[in-house]
Image: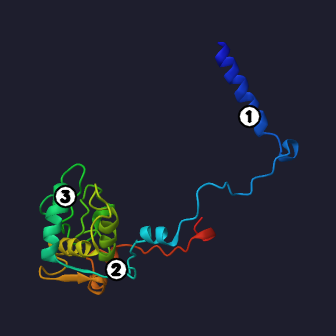
């Protein structure tokens, strides 16, 4: 064993031995659970990232967007990854448009089936949420609320869920009923001990 390896091994043994000593033996103050690292986030910092939208849409922001506006936004900011008609660009970018299968819900039995906004997504409000927080891929969070409403409207229209002349805002988006909505079991866990 080289001298460097021997010194390293001895240092490791001393460190392990020191870890095993009690605070009474070392005279150190036991940890309080605080390590004085960082700082508390400001209300503004929390508000900037606390933008998730739940299934009921209660948190939807002001704004509106039409299907025709969504076609322009989608073409400029989404089509390069998801295809001009939402057909996807395999293998990295999923298909967004498609209603097949229209009957039944065989996704649990056939993992090869493609899940799209039109045949699988249970809530229109969470489409808005995902697009707003995560898209476009290289600039997540860069779309305005109006652009997100518009892209959401375009996606829903392409999937034959709303009309091609529709305009969405918070109230009309909450009213959209997705084809797969009743196919999911709502997670009603409250958190804490009953979940563990």
Residue 33 x, y percent position in the rendering: 70, 57
Q: Residue 26: where, in percent of width, then height?
A: 84, 42
User: How far is the residue under mark 3 from the one under mark 1?
Assistant: 53 Å
Q: Which residue in the protein does label 1 denote?
A: 16
Point 69% across, 23% down: residue: 9
Closer to the camera, 67 or 119?
67
Q: Is residue 152 left or right of residue 46?
A: left
Nearer the N terminus, badge 3 or badge 1? 1
What is the C-alpha distance between the residues marked 1 and 2? 54 Å
Above or below, 7 against 175 in this view is: above
For the residue labelled by badge 3, is the local secondary structure a helix, a strand or a loop?
helix
Q: Quadrant of the C terminus?
A: bottom right
Q: What residue occupies the far top of the structure in this picture?
A: 2
- The answer, for residue 130, to whether it is visible in the render is yes
Pair 3/2: label in front: 2
Callout 1 crowding tier (Cα within 10 Å): few <14, some 14–19, many ≥20: few
Check residue 82 in the rendering and tell me which mark sits there, or answer none: 3
Looking at the figure, which quarter contains the N terminus?
A: top right
Q: Residue at x 18, y 53 (%)?
A: 89
* Horizontal side of residue 139 vs 15, given as left or right: left
Name the one closer to the observer, 171 or 106. Answer: 171
How busy is the neighbourhood of tag 3: few (under 14 within 10 Å), some, or many (20 plus)? many
Rendered image: mark on residue 61:
2
Tag 1's secondary structure? Answer: helix
Label whose residue precedes the other's in the sequence (1 or 2): 1
Point 28% across, 56% down: residue: 137
**Between residues 109 and 52, which one lies in front from this camera angle?**
52
Q: Is residue 107 left or right of residue 97?
A: right
Q: Position of residue 63 (x, y in %)?
A: 27, 81
């Amino acid at each position: 064993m080289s001298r460097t390896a021997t010194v390293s091994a001895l240092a490791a043994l001393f460190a392990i031995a020191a870890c095993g000593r009690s605070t009474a033996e070392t005279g150190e103050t036991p940890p309080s659970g605080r390590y004085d690292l960082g700082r508390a986030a400001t209300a503004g910092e929390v508000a900037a990232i606390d933008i998730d939208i739940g299934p009921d849409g209660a948190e939807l922001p002001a704004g509106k967007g039409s299907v025709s506006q969504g076609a322009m936004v989608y073409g400029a900011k989404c089509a390069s990854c998801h295809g001009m008609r939402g057909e996807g660009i395999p293998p990295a970018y999923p298909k967004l448009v498609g209603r097949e299968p229209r009957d039944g819900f065989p996704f649990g039995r056939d993992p090869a089936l493609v899940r799209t906004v039109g045949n699988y997504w249970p809530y229109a409000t969470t489409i808005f949420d995902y697009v707003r927080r995560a898209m476009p891929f290289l600039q997540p969070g860069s779309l305005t609320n109006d652009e997100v409403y518009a892209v959401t409207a375009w996606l829903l229209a392409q999937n034959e869920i709303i009309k091609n002349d529709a305009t969405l805002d918070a109230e009309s988006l909450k009213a959209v009923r997705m084809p797969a909505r009743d196919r999911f079991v709502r997670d009603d866990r409250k958190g804490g001990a009953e979940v563990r």
